[in-house]
Amino acid sequence: MDRRRRLWLSAGLAVLLALVVVLAAVIAGSSRTSSGPPSTSASAGATGTPTKSPAKSSAPAAAAPAPPAIPELPAAPLNILVIGSDSRANARDQNNQTVTTGQSSDQRSDCLMLIHVPADRKKVYGISIMRDNWVDIPGYGASKINASLEVGGIPLVVRTVETLLGTHIDHTVMLDFQGFKVLTDALGGIDVNVTLPFTASFDTHHVFAAGVNHLDGEAALEFVRERYSFVDGDYQRVRNQQTFLRALLGKLRGGIQTPSAVLGLVNFATNYLTVDQGYDPASVAILAYALRTVDPGASVFFTLPTAGTGTSPDGQSIVVPDYAGIGQVAAALRDGTLPEYVAAHGY
C-alpha cells in the first residue's frame, strides 16, 4: 500500500479522529530531551596538577536551525470519517486487498463516527453512526452499514455515509484493535468517567467501576467494544465510545501547540493508521496543528437518529434508521447550522 495511506490522523479520532495524529505528536514531543555539550576532562600529570591542553581556536558556532513552520489550514469546515475496524489481523492490509481485488475481507466497522470540524475550530461535533443501521450500500443493496467495510473497503464506507448524510467526507482514518491498544498504551492510558458500571463479557472481563477509571490499551478496547452487558446494547456502547473520545481529546489538547510536536508524529504512527490516499505527511501535520484550538469541553457528541430496533428480511437483528431525523442532521451539516440543531435537541 502507498506509504501516504499509512499515516496518523487525529482527533479522532481517533481513534481515533485527527486524534490519532495528536496522540503521536504528544508522544514525540514528550520523548525529546535536550542534550548539553560534552564535558571535558583534564589529564593529570605526575604531580596531580592538571595539564593544560594547547589552546585551540574555536570554530564559529553553526547557526541554530530555524524552528519548523507549519502553514495554517484555510478557514473552512471539514468532515472526517473515523472507522474502528473489528479486524484481529491487519485492517490496512485487508482494506488494500479488498480495494485492489474486489474480494470481501474479514472485517467490519465496530465504530463509525463522522467528525465535523467547523471553520473556526473552537469545537468538534462527533456524530456516531450505529453499526447495525440497515441502509442501502451503493452497488450492494440493503445491509447493515458496518458491512460496507467488508465488501468494499474504505471507499465504499465513504460512499455509503455520504449517501446517507448527503454530505462530502474530506478525510478518513481507520484503526484496528491492535493499533487502538498500542496507541492508548503509548499515551500512558486514558482516564474515563464510567457512569454505568459493568463487567466486560469478553477477553479479560475487565470490571469497570462507577467513577473515573484509568484504562490501559486492553481495558480501553473492552470499554469501547462492550455491548452485551447493557440493556440497550449498542446504544450504550456508542455512548461509551463518545465518552472515550472526549477523554482522549482532553488529554491530548496540549500536545499540538507547537510545530515541533506535530512534526514528530509521522514515524511513530505509520504502522497503526490508515488514512485516505493522497494525504501526505505535510497535510496530516497541517490538519493536526489546525486542531490545537479545539476545546474538548465545548465539543458535542451525539448519535445519528434511529427509530429503534427490528429484524431484517433475512432475519438479522438491526437498527432502523430514522430518516426524518437523519434528514435534519444532513440539513444542518449542509447549511452550517449544527450548533442550532444540537441546541434544539438538547445535546
Image: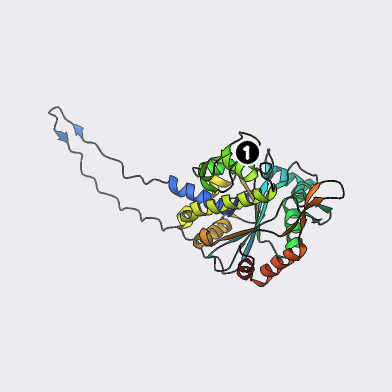
Question: In the drawing, does residue 96 fall left or right of residue 300?
Answer: right
Residue drawn at x 18%, y 38% is 52
Coloring scheme of the render? rainbow
Residue 267 appears at what percent x and percent y? 54, 46
Residue lying at the far left of the rendered structure: 47
Foreground residue among 238 and 175: 238
Expressed as whole percent of the image width and height from the top left, the position of residue 197 reads 58, 43
Element assignment for label 1: loop
- Tell me, yes or no, if residue 289 can be seen here: no
Q: In which quarter of the image is residue 277?
A: bottom right
Q: In this view, does 27 lie above or below 326?
A: above
Position of residue 232 measured from the top left corner of the image (x, y, whole percent) = 69, 48
Spot occupied by residue 256 in the image (x, y as percentages of width and height): 48, 56
From the image, tell me which residue sits under label 1.
Answer: 200
- State left or right for residue 36 relative to residue 141: left
Kind of residue sitting beneath label 1: Ala
Whether residue 158 is visible to the viewer of this picture, yes or no, is: yes
Question: Farthest residue toward the front?
Answer: 231
Name the foreground residue: 289 vs 160.
160
Label count reads 1
Q: In this orientation, which residue lies closer to the viewer: 294 or 232?
A: 232
Quarter residue 38 falls in = top left
> Which quarter of the image is occupied by the C terminus?
bottom right
Residue farthest top in this picture: 46
Residue that protrudes farthest toward the right in the picture: 313
What residue is shown at x 56% (from left), y 57% (from top)? 282
In the image, 287: left or right of 225?
left
- Residue 286 higher or lower than 49, as above or below: below
